[in-house]
Image: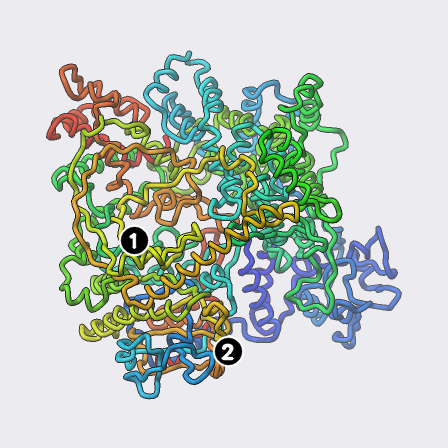
Amino acid sequence: MSSCTDYHASRRRFLAQFAGTAALLGMPINRLVAAIGSAHAPKAESVVLFWNGGGMSHIDTWDPKPGREVGGEFEAIKTSADGIQISEIFPQLAKQMHHCSIIRSIAGTNGDHGRATYELQTSHPQNPALVHPGMGSFVVNERQKSGDLPAYISIGGMAPRAGYLGQRCEAYYIGLPGERDPYLAFPDGIHHAQGERRLEILAKMNLRTSGKLAARDLKEADVALKDAVALMKSPALSSFDLDKENPKTLERYGLTEFGRGTLLARKLIETGVRFVQVNRGGFDNHMDVFPAMRNHGSVMDPAVASLIEDLHQSGRLEKTLVIMLSEFGRTPKINKDAGRDHHARVFSCFMAGGGIKGGQVIGSSDKDGMAPENRPVQVADLHASVCHALGIDHTRELTTPLNRPMKLVREGAKPVAELFA
Amino acid sequence: MPVFARVLIALACSVGAASADVDFRQQIQPIFESACIRCHSAEKVKGGLRLDTKAGFLKGGEHGPLIDAKNWEKSELLRRIKLPRDHDEIMPQETEPLSGPHKNWLTDWVRTGANWPAGVVLKIHKKEVPGLAEKEFIPAKAPASLAEAAAMADQILTREVAASKGPQPKVAPPIDDLAFLRRATVDLIGRIPTADEIRQFERDSAGDRRAKLVDRLIAHPRFAERWTVFFADMLRVRSQQDGGPQLLAYVNRSVAEAKPYDQMARELIATNGRPENTPAAGFALGDAANPMALAGATSQIFLGVRLQCAECHDHPFDDWKQKEFYDLAAFFGTIKRVETGKNVKRIYTTEAKETAVKWPPEREQPPKRDAVAPKFPFELVNFTTKPHFISRLEERRRPNPKALSNAEAKKALDDLVDGFDVKKALRDSKTEAAILAEAKAAARQADDGRSIYAQSEERKKLAALITDPRNPYFARAFVNRVWAELVGRGFVEPLDNISAYNEIRQPQTLQFLAQEFIASGYDLRSLVKLVMLTPSYQRGHLPAGADLAELKRAEEAFTATRARRMLGEVLFDSVTVAGHLLTHKWPEGANVREVKRQIRIPLANAALLAAAEDKTTNQPNMMMAMNKPGQAPAPYDLEKGANLDFEALLKPEKMSKDDDKFGDVLSESKKDLAMNKKMEDDAIEAARQARIRLLQSGNAERFRLEIITAIVDDNPKFDTTLRMATPAPASHFLRVFGQPARDNLGEFRDESPSLRQELMLLNGKATHEASRVGPLEPVHHLIAGPGANPAKAVELVYLEIYTRRPTAEELADAREVIAAGKTPADGLADLRWAMLNSHEFRYLP
């Protein structure tokens, strides 16, 4: 066994003991931390994560600075939640704000796309010795799937890797929402009866091999094959289909890839998928940030607002945590190209549903959105909060294939208690 | 005992209020041995103090006793170890201050009476090279041939296994000839054998057909392609990185040209320059020319030692010190990554004036940090008499006058390290471009007369130390990897963790193979052949019924092999070979059909969309890519890949017009550039304005769907995946079948099965097309038409897919399957599909 973290862990335990602390204190401390908001019973069963790659401007979205030079082109508008204002690019979301929470005081540490993305998606700093699982992977590791569909689906882009959790926890990837996934049905020209016959021949052949060999992997391969065939035959596959949707619904979410992806996310959640990640790029606006954000608003606002409204209507909002993340914010200062550059010191995040308390803003940035002013929130606190909403112990220790103990969420993270007040 | 075990014992002892249980042998002795007695023992008695014996400890030194029995907290021992780092009297002085836990252990030990068990004498603790101590089974005599070496390796292995403790492992019988053919072909050229290759193999005489086969495969052009994959995993080649494609092409060429492995390693470690000209520079660029990352990568990749953990603290479970990591990193201290050019980026490595590696570590926020001098933390073995494998290496490398006269063919070892030879390029090139190149070359000389691609003397020294035949890690680390690639398990697992705290299985066999590898001139092909001739490579698997412990024991003793799954690349290429998909198997127009497709028609104004396109960059702008939904989706993209042109990548790049970096000699072309630039700038600005209008229109991403009818002729042809840009995108077939992302050190291939893998084979384009029987493939006339012979057809299909003939039972089953098809050809397609999807196809015999 060889690792860096377990060394730290044992060293810490040591120091705790020699400092005269009871040896068993380590665990209770963690439990105490986990128990913040313990009156709150976990309600969330599934998660929709909107990942906005590139670093979304916080000032132009969730943390407007009206009247300040850094405020930029957009007005702040009133919302359905008393005293909360957001950017004018989200007029429909403004009407859902009583369901939503905004955290305005995330204290990021990393202004590099790669490293910041890694940390925002996994809660851990990038470490050359190990790949940590992304949020979706560790959630489905703790919460198995219900129904035939894969537990974790990524739409319109790549989800982070499952790392040491392995293939089992990788996201199922959907490129274009609504398009038929060719891998989920027999190829064109193979009708059902022929496909069934093929599977029978295959089963017989595999049985012969398994009977002769003591290989461990064959059993797992048999399970994977069984799951694959079950998925191909599942009626739940129709949730991937958007053709039968009411054209008005499609219009409401927006005739865009993002709108279709968001609608698909809702349908998948309704079918029992645990974690859906909807990916969107184009936020690295070093140039012309305002037209870019105007466009982002026109695409995202109807989709996300419709999702929250529909989930609320169907009573699923309580059970579905919606969270929107980006790797960092953007500079308050507007640069010479009418853009904003990377800014990690403070940025915002948006959440709704999943049993969290709506209509509130947690923390604040200073008057120009430069740094946290009140109640700084660490990046990993977001992951702890997602775990808490789902009733997952974020301090749980997992073991990597090389027998290295590893915390689910970075050590020291605390759920943001106000979300669960 | 591994340190963590000590820690655990200490933990167990100290639960409860009292910490009286500090264990001298487990906790205190190692501290004294590693930190104190180098200066305070019989050999050297600094300050009159000896700490190797109880008497010496009790007596104390010039400053009096170490322990204050009345007031333990005032003890001199504790005062000294707790002083600040830069205090004159801190102990230890020759090494790093003690860590927190060590200070705590000593404190507790003193508090509880500083009990030194009688008779315990301490010895200077020497860092040991793991797995070298025993060599009684290794014969003194050098083998005369590879076959003899393979036999010797097996004798050593057998004796090691027999001498091991515990129950003896089960032994699997050797595999039969056709299974060997399949295994060897897959391992050496990255696909299953064809029917022709099977026939050729069977024509060879039974006595030496295996050895002959190995020779044939080693000379096959695909050998280099297949083993490029091995090196690409090991070196973490990423074609999307700066210098990545060139590095991949370099590796491919090095394997093709049978470049000795030590030479390749030296080039990778020491080369600076622009990868377009000196592709080995891509290795350092892969880690962004960061000295710390390069130190970690170099030790783990080339020496199989995970020194990386020591970057942030003394290695927790090994003897490596943080300072040693810095010593190693200092060899890379002056490496510098340079990026120039605006529209076309030029990226290269060169040398900076000052080292970036300083001590103490920055995170300790020391008042002052000093440059670290490079120092190789690994000890070379000091042989009293020169061992035969080194003499044999020297013999092999003695300059041969005949060969030297052929100067072009025989390059000096370090030639490539010295970088792209501008003068030679000029000689070779007779065009006008050469004149420009000469001017540029002149301009490239910096004030001090050095090329802008300065080379590093320190890294050359490091490269020489790492590849020295007396280095006990270099050859063994590589042999361990090659053995694991072929046999399915390494002597050391994980493959890059040679450590005193990680058991090496059958260490003498490993040592012997490493010696032979050195003696062969670090020749990959000799090593591969040697491994393949050993009985270990040729063992079958344990039959069903063996339990996990038995499997483990036999695999660790190499008396049985594990059922390995083919690598993703090999699996895909095997499907296409078995299905005759490398050429068209249908006449043109045979499969014409209409398909309905849904396409996206942008709602935005077409002229505005076109105007807004970013013409200045080849890199897809994420949002703009999303704004171009017009094309029909390509449903099987996850099986496609762009192949790289290795040859073109290795041609030194001609100086291009926009290379405006190098001085006044280029003023003419610079003027041109300025003119072009002005026009370009106007065009860029126009596109920007169009983009702003598009984004504000609210229609930038909106589209409507339309169903179109397309005519397709389903007659696909596939290319090998071994030349693909690598690693493939996430979710690609290769990645789903375990190709690592290669972002981090120690990422190995994931062989675990998954649902996604099954779906990609069950319903993938390649399996589907491979199953269909086309008129241009050999089996066609056996299944359709007047001369049809279904039994022969089944036999051919079994040979082509499973590399064996069907049993009587399988033949009967197959005939039923064929009969059940709409046509016999359809039935045969069903059979082939099932075979391609089966365990037997994916897992090696």
**Res B570 quadrant in image:** top left
Chain of the residue under the numbered disc 1 shown in the image: A
Count neighbours of disc 2 (C-alpha within 10 A) and say few if under 14, some if 14 to 19, many if 20 or more.
many
Count neighbours of disc 1 (C-alpha within 10 A) and say few if under 14, some if 14 to 19, many if 20 or more.
some
**Number of marks in the rendered image:** 2
* In this picture, residue B294 sits left or right of residue B634: right
Is residue B558 shown above or below A9?
above
Report x, y in % for residue B829: 20, 30
Chain of the residue under the numbered disc 2 shown in the image: A
Report x, y in % for residue B56: 83, 59
The one of B705 and B785 positioned closer to us in this rendering: B705
Report x, y in % for residue A199: 19, 39
Residue A371 disc label = 2
**Res A40 quadrant in image:** bottom left
* In this picture, residue B826 sits left or right of residue B277: left
Point out the tag, 2 or 1, that comes first from the N-terminus: 1
Q: Are marks 2 and 1 on the same chain?
A: yes
Is residue A213 shown above or below B781?
below
Residue A48 disc label = none
* In this picture, residue A292 sits left or right of residue B524: left
Is residue A282 shown above or below B73?
above
**Res A151 quadrant in image:** bottom left
Q: Give the amino acid type for the residue marked by disc 1 in the picture.
A: Gly
Q: Give the amino acid type for the residue marked by disc 2 in the picture.
A: Ala
